[in-house]
Amino acid sequence: MEKIWRKTYSPGVPAEVNVGEFKSLKEILEKSCARFADRPAFTNMGTSISYADLDRLTRQFGAFLQKDLGLGKGDRVAIMMPNLLQYPVALLGTLRAGMTVVNVNPLYTPRELRHQLRDSGASVIVVLENFASTLQEVLAETPVKTVLTTQIGDMQPGIKRLLVNFVVKRVKKMVPDWHIPGTVDFRRALDRGAGEELDDVPVGHDDVAFLQYTGGTTGVAKGAVLTHGNIVANLLQVSAWIAGNLREGAETVVTPLPLYHIFSLTVNCLMFLKWGANNVLITNPRDIPGFIKEIKALKFSAITGVNTLYNALLHHPDIVSVDTSHLKIAVGGGMAVQRAVAEKWREVTGVTLIEGYGLTETSPVVCINPLEAKEFSGKIGLPIPSTEVRVTDDDGKELGVGQVGELCVRGPQVMGGYWNMPAETAKVLTSDGWFRTGDMAEIDERGYVRITDRKKDMVVVSGFNVYPNEVEDVVAMHPGVLECAVIGIPDEHSGEAVKLIVVKKDPNLTEKELIGHCRKHLTGYKVPRKVDFRAEPLPKTNVGKVLRRLLRDEELAKRAAKAA
């Protein structure tokens, strides 16, 4: 398709970016640390580390990995924790040492964690003590040789560190019992690294920066191979889009989404690192009163989040106490932004909530709405610089303006494939570099893209992907289940919720029993919110595949009839 969207770009936004501006994320880190040495780089729970601190700490962590543990270029290091100051130190120190980061959701069940560690081949993991008991259950079945543990307050100063760690462990009892022999304390690792020199490992565009796991239609998570070139390209693309609104070394961005999520990782952590911004990490964004207390006096200029987070903030009475007078950019991604939320956000803050779109496999950003937009459009925006999009029919034939088809993307931010999964890679990547997103969309005459539906059966819960096959595999493990299907249903809080439809084998099987079974094997957002039992077999194709779409249509029809 002709790049018609370029005619709609805001003044100053280039058609292409120079992806060769930086060789690697390592170079971006080192240049920012030198340029903005005295500026705060990351802030958490009221404590900041400067860019000079970040330079020193990442050197120490990288040197520990190289010299103490003997890791080499390309070795995988897993990180399993929420947003704490330890996270960027471990993440950027790993990249600086020439190694690959494997981001791990700390809410994973043992089954999910076992798969990701085994599949990635990670030999080291940095884990918050609160989640060490989960790791303990599966450690012997993984290739992990070294476990680094940390506590929530470990990067806080003196007395505050001791107090926070005591309250978390002894008063709030947030750390389940665990015992893993031979662990290394994170602070001790930094001390050991301080006595070593960090080898300057050459890192380029083709080197793997992240194995970023995303749910798969096969029922197991797949590792998207994201190179330094992919991530550098995407942060430059997003940077070019918003450059007119930012000043180097003068911005503060609020980061409530976890850094293990690709949106937060690229846009907040890495893109704003390039700008010399202060990144305020929110450890527990679900604690809305605590979240508001932390930011209400903060002179922040940017915030990103998912629709459900903005909705929760807007529905809390203390939102009026938040100082948004310095706010320039508010971006919603990870899931669709709802019109009511966007309009309320502008009413309260005076700033338009800008919707964007992306996927793990695209590092992630593909489209963003112009920042000067004055109202909610219901569209995901325009393709960003150096990005091509098109819509195709089931045979791969390109469709024209206004026609609905599968959205396909090509650009320097598109992954090279899935880790150790050539067959899965071949399903989504064409020989000429187009990535099939699985989302149905249309492109209008100005180049704006609108998502109309999902070709795949994926359910998006608060910005996180849930794949029916994975949930169905877990449900089918229960001896009382004859057959089952999972669909997504509309939910005013999370965008969508997981609904489970079951034909019983055991007539005494209950909803409570099934949900309890799911909680043992699935992360919370994947657990079904509702269970329907049916006496008749589920509808299927002539080859026996359950017709999830038919089930979803039935559910929507029932809801419409009830509303009427």
Image (spheres, helix red, strand yellow):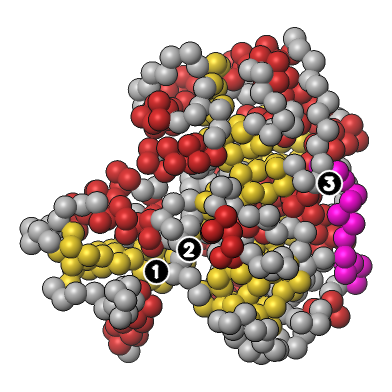
Asked if the magenta segment contains residue 21, the reply would be: yes
Mainly helix, strand or loop, the magenta region?
A: loop
What's the CA distance linking mark 1 and mark 2? 8 Å
Q: Which secondary structure lies at badge 1?
A: strand
- Residue type beneath disc 1: Gly
Q: Residue at x 48, y 70 (%)?
A: 456
Query: What residue do we see at 36% from left, 48% from top?
Result: 522
Image spot of residue 283 (x, y percent): 56, 39
In terms of secondary structure, where does tag 2 sit? strand
Q: Secondary structure at mark 3?
A: loop
- Point out which mark residue 299 bears: none
Quarter of the figure that contains the C terminus: bottom left
Q: Is residue 459 visible?
A: yes
Task: Point out the stretch of residues depicted in magenta.
Answer: 11-24
The three-letter amino acid code for the residue at tag 2 is Val
> In the image, what residue occupies the spot 48% across and 13% down?
182
What number is the disc on residue 488?
Answer: 1
What is the x, y in percent for residue 340? 55, 73
Mark 3 or mark 2, earlier in chain:
3
Mark 3 or 1 closer to N-term? 3
Coordinates of residue 354 in the picture (x, y in percent): 69, 67
Q: Nearer the viewer, residue 424 or 320?
A: 424
The amino acid sitting under disc 3 is: Trp
Residue 404, percent from left and from top: 60, 86
- Nearer to us in this view, 500 or 457: 457
Note whether 441 is above or below 159 in the view shown: below
Residue on which the image places disc 3: 275
Residue at numbered disc 2: 460
Q: Residue at x 88, y 65 (%)?
A: 16
- Regarding residue 190, the answer to whether it shows in the image is no
